[in-house]
Amino acid sequence: MSALSLPFLSCTFSSTYPFSNSLNSFFSSLIPFQRVKLFGSTSKATTRSFFLTARAMAELVKDKESGVATAGGGKMDIEHSRTFLEARSEEELLSGIKKEVEARRLPPNVAAGMEEFYRNYKNAVFQSGDPAAAETVLSNMAVALDLMLLDVEDPFVFQPYHKALREPFEYYMFGQNYIRPLIDFRNSYVGNLSLFYEIEEKLKQGHNVVLFSNHQTEADPAVIALLLEKTYPHIAENLIYVAGDRVITDPLCKPFSMGRNLICVYSKKHMYDVPELADMKRKANIRSLKEMALLLRTGSKLVWIAPSGGRDRPDPVTGEWNPAPFDSSSVDNMRRLIESSGAPGHMYPLALLCYDIMPPPSKVEKEIGERRIISFHGAGLSVAPEIAANCEKSEEVKDVYTQALYKSVTEQYNVLKSAIHGKQGLEASTAGIALSQPWN
C-alpha cells in the first residue's frame, strides 16, 4: 500500500508503556505500507457489472440542496461530478480528465498522474492476453478515477486506526478487483499454506500475531489478500497494515488505502519535509502508537509490518532485488508491544515477491505523486514457522533475533524467486518451504 516506513517519536509514556524509552528507534524503521458486489475482471459479466457499479456509485450522489454523500460517510458542499461514471469508452474517460481540469475541479498535476495511471494500467492488463481486457480496464479505471476525483473534491481524513470501509461503498473489493488482473496466477505461488491455518487458529483463540515482512510495492496489501482470499479470506480481510503517510495523502493512493485496515503514521523520512508540521506529525504518531497498543490488548489481531525502513529496491550495481535488512530496534519494540498487550502473541517471518507488478522509484522521493509503472506478472507469498523471542534483552540477543527473522524471510524470498523468475514453479519447493497454488 506505499506501505511505508514509520517515523520516530519523541515522547514519554507512563509505566503502562514499558517500551517508551525506545520509541524513536521503533518508529524509525517500521513499515506498512470498499455495499455492492463489484465487477468481475475476466468475464463477459464485466461490462454489465460495471454499469451496476456505476449506478451504485451514483447512489452516493445527492442533490446540491442536501449535499453529496461521500464514500467516507461525510457530506460535500458541492455536487460530485459524474464524468467518469458516465464514460462508456477510453476516449470519454481521457477527455473526462481534461474536462475536469478545465472545470477547475482537478489540479493539472493530479490529472497528469491519473492519465499516466490509466495508460500504464491498460498496458499491464492487456499483457495478460485476457479477451475481456478492454472491458476490465474501462470498468476498473472508471471507478478508480471517480474515487480519485471524489477525494480531490472532498478529501478523506484517515484516523490513527483506520478500519476498512466496506459500505456504503465496498472499497476493499474495489482494491481487490483492481489489482487482480495484474497478477499472473499461473506463475504465482504461496509457500507453507498450512501455516496460515495455524495462524488463523491462534487468532480464533484470542492470540495476537505479527507478520514481519519485506515490503515491495504500494500494491502489497492487495497482493497478499488476493493470494489468500480463496483459502483464508478471514486473514485476507482482517490484516492490519502499518501505513505511512504517503498512502493516506496521495489522491491516487487513497481510494485503495481506504479499503484496508491501517495504523496510520507519518514517516521519519518525510517528517521534516515541511518543518512547521513536524510537531503535529509527532503528536499524530503518539496517537497511532496508543491505538496499536489498545488494539493488541483486545487480542485476536493480525498485524503486518515491514521493519526495514522502506520498500525493497534493486542493487544499484547488479540490479538484483532482495529484501532490505531489518532494523533490530523496530523488531524489538514490536515484540514489546506484543508482550505488554496481555494476550498471547506470536511472531512469524513472511516473504513477499511482487515488485514487477508496481516497482517503486529507484530512490526515495520527497514529493507526493510518484510515477506508477505497472506490469502483469506472477507474485509470491510465503510464511515460515513462528520464531520465539529470547527472554534475554541484551542488544546482542536483539540483533540475533532480528537476523533470524530476516534470514528466514530471505530464504523464503529466494525460493519464490526461483519459482517465479527462475521458472522452476512448484519444483522450487524445499524441505522447509512447500509451494502451492491454492486457487487451482
Image: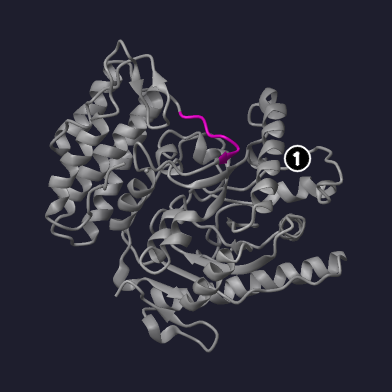
Q: Residue 152's spot in the image, x, y percent?
A: 40, 25
Asked if residue 63 is positioned above or below residue 44 in the image, the reply reads above
Q: Amino acid at mark 1?
A: Leu
Over which residues does the magenta segment extend?
156-161
Q: Quadrant of residue 96?
A: top left
The foreground one among 110 and 180 is 180
The answer to whether any part of residue 56 appears in the image is: yes
The answer to whether any part of residue 424 appears in the image is: no
The foreground one among 366 and 248 is 248
Q: Residue furthest front?
A: 205
Asked if residue 303 is positioned above or below residue 258 in the image, the reply reads below
Instruction: Please tell me which residue is depicted at 30% across the width and 35% down the height of the picture.
Output: 145
Instruction: Please tell me which residue is depicted at 43% across the width and 80% down the height of the picture.
Output: 435
The residue that disc 1 covers is 9
Number of residues whose C-alpha sits closer than 10 Å to that of mark 1, classed few (under 14), some (14–19) or many (20 or more): many
Give the dominant element type of the magenta stretch: helix, strand or loop. loop
